[in-house]
Image (cartoon, rainbow, N blue to C red):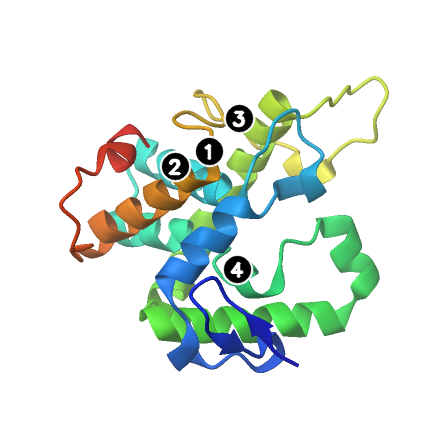
C-alpha cells in the first residue's frame, strides 16, 4: 500500500525504501503534523518539537552530532504519522515494528544511523525535557485533577518557551530545513537568508 508524499514520491510506509526518502518531504510533513493528537492550546507540530529538542541540546552544550540526532529523532513520523504514546501501547508490537523499520530507512537515507545510536541517550533526555516543557506551556495539565505523567518524574523543564519564532507551518518547515543545512554543512542552494534558523 502506497502513500504519496509532498514532492510526489510514492512510498510504502511499511517497507520504506531509503532511496525514496527526502529531507524536503520530512520537513514539510513534520511542519503540518500535530503533536499530542492536536490537543494543544495552539497548533504545535512535530517540526516545532524537533527544533525545541535541538535548542535544549544546544543549551546544554551538546555537540553538533547530538543536535543533528535530536533534529531527526522523529523524522520517520513524516511517513508513519505521530501517534500519542497511550495509543502506541494499545497498538502493541506491530506499531513498534513499523516505527523501527521506518526509522532505520530514514537514518540510512540521511547517513545518520551511527549518529542516532551514539547520541540516543542524550537525545532521549532532551526529548523528555521537551515533553515537560510542552506540557507546561501548551497543555491544560492540572496535577490536582489529572493522572501523573510518571515518565517525567525527575525530568527538568527547559528554561525557555516551548516555541519561539513564526507560527505558520511554512515558517517551521523552512526553519527545519535551515537547521538541517547548518548542522550538516549542506548548502540549501537558496539565495534567501536563513533568518529562521538563526532564531531557533
SS assignment at label 4: helix
Q: Position of residue 10 (x, y in %)?
A: 51, 77
Q: Which residue is mark 3?
A: 157
Q: At 38% across and 75% down in the image, what residue appears? A: 108
Residue 171: give its label.
2
Q: CA distance from mark 3 to mark 1?
A: 25 Å
Q: Are the residues at dot 3 and dot 2 in contact (C-beta closer than 8 Å)?
A: no
Q: At 41% across and 25% down in the image, what residue appears? A: 164
Q: CA distance from mark 3 to mark 4?
A: 26 Å
- The front one of 74 and 116 is 74
Is 144 drawn above or below residue 11 in the view shown? above
Q: Name the quadrant containing residue 150.
A: top right
Q: At 74% across and 23% down in the image, what residue appears? A: 141
Q: Earlier in the sequence, mark 3 or mark 2?
A: 3
Q: Which residue is mark 1?
A: 168
Q: Quadrant of the N terminus?
A: bottom right
Front: mark 3 or 2: 2
SS assignment at label 2: helix
Q: CA distance from mark 2 to mark 4?
A: 17 Å
Q: Earlier in the sequence, mark 3 or mark 4?
A: 4
Q: Which residue is mark 4?
A: 78
Q: Quadrant of the C terminus?
A: top left
Q: Position of residue 42 (x, y in %)?
A: 61, 27
SS assignment at label 3: loop
Q: Are the residues at dot 2 and dot 1 in contact (C-beta closer than 8 Å)?
A: yes
Is 94 drawn above or below residue 61 in the view shown? below
Amino acid at each position: 500500500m502506497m502513500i504519496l508524499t509532498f514532492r510526489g514520491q510514492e512510498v510504502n510506509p511499511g517497507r520504506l525504501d531509503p532511496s525514496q526518502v527526502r529531507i524536503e518531504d520530512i520537513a514539510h510533513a513534520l511542519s503540518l503534523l500535530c503533536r499530542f493528537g492536536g490537543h494543544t492550546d495552539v497548533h504545535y507540530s512535530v517540526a516545532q518539537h524537533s527544533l525545541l529538542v535541538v535548542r535544549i541540546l544546544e543549551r546544554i552544550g551538546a555537540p553538533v552530532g547530538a543536535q543533528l540526532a535530536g533534529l531527526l529523532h522523529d523524522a520517520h513520523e513524516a511517513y508513519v504519522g505521530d501517534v500519542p504514546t497511550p495509543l502506541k501501547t494499545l497498538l502493541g508490537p506491530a506499531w513498534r515494528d513499523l516505527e523501527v523499520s521506518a526509522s532505520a530507512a530514514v537514518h540510512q537515507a540521511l547517513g545518520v544511523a551511527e549518529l542516532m545510536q551514539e547520541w540516543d541517550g542524550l537525545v532521549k533526555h532532551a526529548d523528555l525535557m521537551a515533553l515537560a516543557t510542552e506540557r507546561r506551556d501548551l497543555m491544560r495539565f492540572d496535577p490536582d485533577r489529572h493522572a501523573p505523567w510518571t515518565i517525567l518524574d525527575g525530568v527538568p523543564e527547559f528554561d525557555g518557551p516551548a516555541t519561539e519564532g513564526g507560527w505558520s507551518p511554512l515558517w517551521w518547515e523552512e526553519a527545519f530545513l535551515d537547521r538541517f543545512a547548518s548542522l550538516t554543512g549542506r548548502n540549501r542552494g537558496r539565495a534567501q537568508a536563513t533568518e529562521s534558523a538563526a532564531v531557533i
